[in-house]
């Protein structure tokens, strides 16, 4: 049962980041703030900066959620989530290299670990 709680804690953090990111993208597109996604990519710097900022916030929240739900050793779970974020970020750099300025996918990959760690640390400092 412990392993299921551990897997659930990591998945909950992951789902938090993904669902909030996709929902915010959708909301901003439906409000006309961001253009619809196209195969041509997105090259407007301020839009990418806004997207990076809310993804950073959601990544911190994902780390917090994982640490909160972890049955034991919360930072171990947070590090697993951070590793998943780093792998996903690197894959995003490769897949999205020509879909935006290069700084954006690189920033997503580079911020994955420290932001996830920060979320976990914010949660665990309340436990001490």
Image (spheres, grey):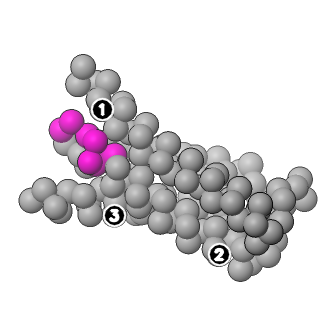
The residue beneath circle 2 is 49
User: At 51% across and 51% down in the image, what residue appears?
Assistant: 17
User: At 33% across and 55% down in the image, what residue appears?
Assistant: 64
Residue 38 point in image, percent of width and height: 88, 55
Extreme residue toward the top, this view: 1
Q: Give the tally of numbered discs.
A: 3
Residue 13 point in image, percent of width and height: 42, 45
User: At 17% across and 62% down in the image, what residue appears?
Assistant: 125
* Magenta residues, start to end: 66-72
* 62 in the magenta segment: no
Asked if residue 121 lies left or right of residue 39, the reply is left
Residue 128 point in image, percent of width and height: 9, 59
User: At 69% across and 60% down in the image, what residue appears?
Assistant: 27
Asked if residue 59 lies left or right of residue 19, the reply is left
Of labels 3 and 2, earlier in sequence is 2
| SS under mark 3 | helix
CB contact under 8 Å: marks 1 and 3: no
Dot 2: few (<14), some (14–19), or many (≥20) neighbours within 10 Å?
Answer: some
Residue 23 visible at all: yes
The residue beneath circle 1 is 6
Q: CA distance from mark 3 to mark 2?
A: 20 Å
Residue 118: mark = 3
Dot 3: few (<14), some (14–19), or many (≥20) neighbours within 10 Å?
Answer: some
| In the foreground, 104 or 49 | 49
Extreme residue toward the bottom, this view: 46
Quarter holding residue 97: bottom right
């Amino acid at each position: 049962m412990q392993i299921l709680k551990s897997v659930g804690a990591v998945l909950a953090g992951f789902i938090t980041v993904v669902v909030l990111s996709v929902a915010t993208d959708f909301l901003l597109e439906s409000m006309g703030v961001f253009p619809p996604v196209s195969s041509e990519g997105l090259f407007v710097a301020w839009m990418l900066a806004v997207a990076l900022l809310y993804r950073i916030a959601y990544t911190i929240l994902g780390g917090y959620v994982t640490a909160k739900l972890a049955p034991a050793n919360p930072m171990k779970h947070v590090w697993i989530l951070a590793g998943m974020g780093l792998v996903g970020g690197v894959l995003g750099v490769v897949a999205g290299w020509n879909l935006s300025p290069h700084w954006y996918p690189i920033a997503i990959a580079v911020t994955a670990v420290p932001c996830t760690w920060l979320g976990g640390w914010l949660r665990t400092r309340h436990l001490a």
